[in-house]
Image: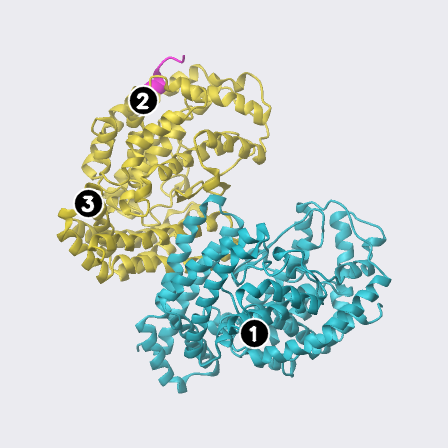
Chain colours: A yellow, B cyan
Amino acid sequence: MAATPYKQLEQEWQRLHAFSGALSLLRWDAAVMMPRGSADVRGEQLAAIETEQHALLTSPRVARLLERAQAGAGELDSWQHANLREMLRQRDHAIATPVPLISRLARATSVAEVSWAAASEKQDFNIFAPHLEEVLQLVRDKAALLGQALNLAPYDALMDGYTPGIRGAEIDTVFRALSRRLPTLIREAIERQAAAPALPVAGKFTTARQRALITEVMKAFGFPFDRGRLDESDHPFTEGGAGDVRVTTKLDQGDPFKGLLAALHETGHALYDLGVPREWRTQPVGKERGIALEESQSLLIEMIICRSRPFLQYLRPLLEKHFAISGPEWEPGNLYRLLTQVRRGAIRVDADELTYPMHVVLRYGIEKDLMDGKLAVRDLPEAWNHRMQDRLEVKPANAAEGCLQDVHWAHGAFGYFPSYGIGAVIAAQLYESLRAATPDLDARIEHGDFTAVRNWLVEHVHAEGARLPPQELVRHATGKPLTAAASLRYLEARYLEEAR
Amino acid sequence: MAATPYKQLEQEWQRLHAFSGALSLLRWDAAVMMPRGSADVRGEQLAAIETEQHALLTSPRVARLLERAQAGAGELDSWQHANLREMLRQRDHAIATPVPLISRLARATSVAEVSWAAASEKQDFNIFAPHLEEVLQLVRDKAALLGQALNLAPYDALMDGYTPGIRGAEIDTVFRALSRRLPTLIREAIERQAAAPALPVAGKFTTARQRALITEVMKAFGFPFDRGRLDESDHPFTEGGAGDVRVTTKLDQGDPFKGLLAALHETGHALYDLGVPREWRTQPVGKERGIALEESQSLLIEMIICRSRPFLQYLRPLLEKHFAISGPEWEPGNLYRLLTQVRRGAIRVDADELTYPMHVVLRYGIEKDLMDGKLAVRDLPEAWNHRMQDRLEVKPANAAEGCLQDVHWAHGAFGYFPSYGIGAVIAAQLYESLRAATPDLDARIEHGDFTAVRNWLVEHVHAEGARLPPQELVRHATGKPLTAAASLRYLEARYLEEAR
């Protein structure tokens, strides 16, 4: 008996999955192993496989099979149904943007990235402005086409490419709630912390010892070193997936925490990769549910668990073992103060947990205004600085510390930023439910036992793959709709409650 | 104006080139970086890209374009003409073996490899015999189909897949000449060397220092570390190509020469990769001219140049610099005796330059007899041991040291072995011409100046790419037909002449 149209589609997506795995390895190698001069050769290889993926996804054969599978969808179980929905979504995204527009965007963004780097170096927005203008115009065209194809507002259509199912109206509600509370919360936290400042730590922490410490902690979280790797790169990232998952970090010999926490952030991503349902691993429904959910997993591990008092109790003897340190600055209470320090700053990637959401809210507002034409590119630096002052009481020293600090817009990645903020909100909401379900959570973490954390995440989040839209997945996991409430409760508890 | 059929073919082969580069990186990673447990995932990725390559190569579109390009071949220049010929050859090879036979061979060889490993471990040929029987039958089928498609004898058709253009009749002539002279030459060399035995070297040579030494020597040969890498793996190999060429070696802390010479062997391959014509690098005519030529380049560097007296004069101060050694055993004269020692042994991969060809001649005779049905699989061990005694006066201790020592036949790689022997013969013939063209060659090598070696090879061999069949390439480079004569002159000079 011939395979059904649906089963034939599964086979096509198995190929797409294998191509994605190859692309992932090629990117990992480019960042970690590749000789500096080889970028052009790697670019050809990536382009050849990406072109093949796009051709397969938009082929008449796949179109026919999708049509026939939809006609026979009554025969499918709920996972197959969701899988078919995700296949359609991927195809619709791929087909909505015509190849000439994709090519123009690729050229424009690659030129824009170069001009962005030059503008950042020279702290001169004018170098970047005309290129951003061109990218913005092409992104608008893309968003309009995507919106038509997906029956969404243009900005929602862009967001759907990063976190499928998230809509501007929900973002607005969540970000409004954060914006109402965070500015005062930031002020209160800073005042409180000023009353009991953290002692700094100092020393030389060799990369070899840092790697040994990080490896030990990652093992405690269940990272599989027989089917995974830890390496160093300029920017920490995770590539690969279950079967061969590769995490990188960036080590600083003067700081024992940066590299560790970056690796644990990535370990959060890796655990998600490892937890998705094995039997669906080659299919779209067996993948992580978009950027916001992915970010929720890394932030839950890095920010919430690994900067908590119980975790630092667990970490203290490991620091002593690997770095032979001692002294009051290494006591868990001081480490907690050190790693939860709130500071107003101009730079998003250096921001702490409490000020970070405001950086995202600012970008979200600006990129929507740029898309809508409410804000002209030439007025961007002024608008940026004005809103920065308004929301974070920070005045960037120059454009490089202002609206030029992120490469996202040069890449044409409008609609990406909100996922960072929503990810943090989801992390806190999941954490609240995890705590409620695990009365001895703190004691377990103190003993370096992360099985309860991991099992809960696998059961309530990872095992669902991409079966549900993000909002439903959050409701399924926590019993509540996605709102900022748990996030604000968590932040107030961490930054305002009395230290134990 | 639309691209001509020929130009469209060039575009298709550009894609095939990019896929090959991706496959090469995936294989490099599997051997050097990949976690041990990830082989299954990598297998899926390799298979997906290989399937795509095969589909592209055998597509009706490419068939139509090839036909139209042949019809318009009068318009092509000589390089384009050769390129079209190589495209046709690749397509004919790909299309001659039907996909079901490819699949059966893939399955049979993967089972045979496992049984081969078990048989080797237990020194029991009977474990392997039925699987070799099956592989042999399938290879015979493949050879018959390939032979029909290429209008070649079946064994010649197999060889054509490794070294295009090499034929059994030529191999026979060359190997007959070697077989006539080498047994007595081996005897004479061993007697001579017994009169002045080499002093052994001893010590601990850390991998870090070995890497530093190897890097320095590779740089002297012009290896581009900004577009290439040196790493370690279980079996030394070269992957990638110009733009990103990756060499591996295997380091032994008790032996400072093994890892160095293996790396220099691979550097010979890498220099060939780097020397092929840049403007043709994505096209079949811009690649190396098959295994025998590739092997000639690695053997010329490793065996002929890097075990020569002038090279060891150059190496001596580097050994002192990196390993702080001293003593008579480190004098160039002794190092020469050490690195050109002739020993009868059962194992091909451990064989020296003089006995190695006899190992190849033996395998060539046996695999042709197996293919022709003149030798039954069950009689293989006895035939092996008998011919081993006859040609090398060696009696393997067991089957693992006998007919089970190589994995090639388990892989179905019949027709591969002769390329090793022909490669050594070509190396010596090229070397004779290189010496004749470069009167001060020894002095240059003594000073670590390898530009003359490299430039001569680029000009006479590398720059020709795959434009000529191997025999014509050799004639073009040396002015003489490919014969064993230069090889025998070289071996007699090295192993019988008085030491200077």
Q: Position of residue B62 (x, y in %)?
A: 34, 73
- Disc 1/disc 2 C-alpha distance (Å): 67 Å
Which chain hosts label 3?
A
For residue A100, what is the image quadrant?
Answer: bottom left
Q: Badge 2 is on which residue? A: A490
- Disc 3/disc 2 C-alpha distance (Å): 36 Å
Front in this rendered view, residue B249 or A90:
B249
Q: Is residue A182 found left or right of B150 in the rendered image?
A: left
Nearest to the eye among marks 3 and 2: give it.
Answer: 3
| Highlighted range, magenta | A491-500
Q: Residues within 10 Å of mark 3 (few under 14, many from 20)?
A: some
- Disc 1/disc 3 C-alpha distance (Å): 57 Å
Which chain hosts label 1?
B
For residue A61, what is the image quadrant?
Answer: bottom left
Q: Residues within 10 Å of mark 1 (few under 14, many from 20)?
A: many
> What amino acid is labelled 3 in the image?
His
> What amino acid is labelled 1 in the image?
Ala
Callouts 3 and 2 close, C-beta under 8 Å: no
Q: Are marks 3 and 2 on the same chain?
A: yes
What element does badge 3 sit on? helix
